[in-house]
């Protein structure tokens, strides 16, 4: 009979068996992650093949571990918006005004027409407008022509028989017909005197000044304006150099600057106190009034120089000039004498040396 083993031998065997079992399990059963030291890694494992088949090292450096990132700060709560002021009520909207009716514009009068238009008292074409009216003042029949032009070149003059010279006469109506005038009046009757500047349609005919120093000169300029002169103020050549279109020597000046330049005692030489009169006035350049007053008859007493000036001022003339009057005073419109020319109280159209006309 064998002798039993001692206790310590049995325990030692048991421990040896347990240890052997643990080692076997640790080696062959339990899987553990492989730990390597980064410095012992063979860099050839990260090489890429070159076109020739050899390995070329990738030059990209291995990144070093940086410091551990710090946690981003937690966002702080956005401040709560403060309550704005309570909105106040805006002003009450004003009531829209009721639309008013647009006034109908008044059309401007048509003075000029592309084709001639004529009536018993008016005539118009593309550059001329004439309107005839009559007034009764101072026991006198007064004939008025309102004339508008587009240019002063249409305010024309003509000599009797188309000839410049002394005592060559023709009636106003005969000269008007010869020049196809729509409207004509007698002029300054230059040929009845030796002196007095004569410029007609831009041509200088007489340079001799007034033999009667009282005679004024009306210069009609290319603009249509009136300029008054006198032989002791300027020579005929100076008037020409200034561009004078027409120069008529008679007078006196009735109105200048809208002011009457004569008085109740003013009169023309060799003239009755009341007479037939012929005058030309300007409202503005190219807008004129021409007046012929009858006289020396029971029907028409005639006007004084002052009465003529006063009448033309009331027409709106800013400048006005007296022309030859008496038996010479004649107004022709569309081929008819429309006033009552007289000689010794009877109807008689006297021959004169020149006219002023439009057509």
Image (spheres, grey):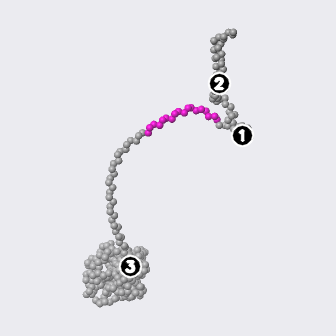
Of the two numbered discs 3 and 1 on the same chain, state the one appearing first in sequence. 1
Residue holding disc 1 = 50
Dividing the picture into quadrants, the one containing residue 139 is bottom left
**Which contiguous range is marked in magenta?**
61-78
Residue holding disc 2 = 25
Crowding at mark 2 (Cα within 10 Å: few <14, some 14-19, many 20+)? few
Percent x, y of residue 156: 40, 81
Dividing the picture into quadrants, the one containing residue 349 is bottom left
Q: For residue 351: magenta?
A: no
**Residue ranking furthest to the front:** 1
Q: Quadrant of the C terminus?
A: bottom left
Whether residue 346 is visible here, answered yes or no, is yes
Whether residue 204 is visible here, answered yes or no, is no
Q: Nearer the viewer, residue 188 or 76?
A: 76
In front of the other: label 3 or label 1? 1
Q: Measure the alpha-carbon separation of dots 3 and 1.
A: 109 Å
């Amino acid at each position: 009979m064998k002798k039993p083993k001692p206790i310590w031998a049995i325990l030692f065997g048991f421990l040896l068996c347990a240890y052997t079992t643990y080692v076997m399990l640790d080696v062959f059963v339990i899987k553990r992650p492989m730990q390597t030291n980064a410095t012992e890694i063979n860099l050839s494992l990260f090489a890429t093949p070159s076109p020739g088949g050899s390995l070329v090292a990738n030059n990209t450096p291995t990144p070093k571990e940086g410091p551990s990132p710090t946690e981003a700060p937690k966002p702080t709560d956005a401040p709560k918006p403060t309550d704005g002021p309570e909105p106040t009520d805006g002003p009450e909207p004003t009531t829209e005004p009721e639309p008013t009716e647009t006034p109908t514009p008044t059309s401007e009068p048509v003075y000029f027409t592309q084709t001639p238009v004529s009536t018993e008292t008016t005539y118009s074409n593309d550059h001329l407008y004439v309107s005839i009216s009559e007034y009764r003042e101072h026991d006198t029949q007064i004939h008025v022509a309102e004339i508008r032009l587009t240019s002063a070149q249409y305010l024309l003059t003509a000599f009797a028989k188309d000839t410049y010279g002394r005592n060559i006469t023709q009636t106003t109506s005969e000269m008007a017909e010869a020049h196809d005038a729509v409207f004509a009046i007698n002029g300054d009757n230059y040929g009845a005197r030796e002196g007095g500047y004569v410029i007609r349609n831009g041509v200088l005919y007489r340079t001799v000044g007034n033999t009667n120093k009282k005679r004024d000169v009306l210069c009609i300029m290319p603009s249509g304006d009136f300029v008054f002169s006198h032989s002791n103020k300027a020579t005929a050549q100076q008037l020409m150099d200034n561009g004078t279109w027409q120069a008529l020597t008679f007078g006196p000046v009735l109105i200048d600057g809208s002011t009457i330049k004569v008085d109740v005692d003013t009169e023309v030489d060799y003239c009755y106190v009341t007479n037939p009169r012929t005058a030309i006035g300007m409202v503005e350049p190219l807008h004129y009034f021409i007046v012929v007053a009858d006289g020396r008859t029971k029907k028409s007493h005639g006007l004084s120089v002052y009465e003529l000036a006063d009448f033309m001022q009331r027409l709106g003339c800013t400048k006005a000039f007296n022309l030859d009057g008496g038996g010479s005073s004649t107004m022709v419109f569309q081929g008819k004498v429309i006033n009552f020319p007289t000689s010794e109280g009877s109807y008689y159209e006297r021959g004169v040396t020149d006219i002023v006309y439009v057509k």
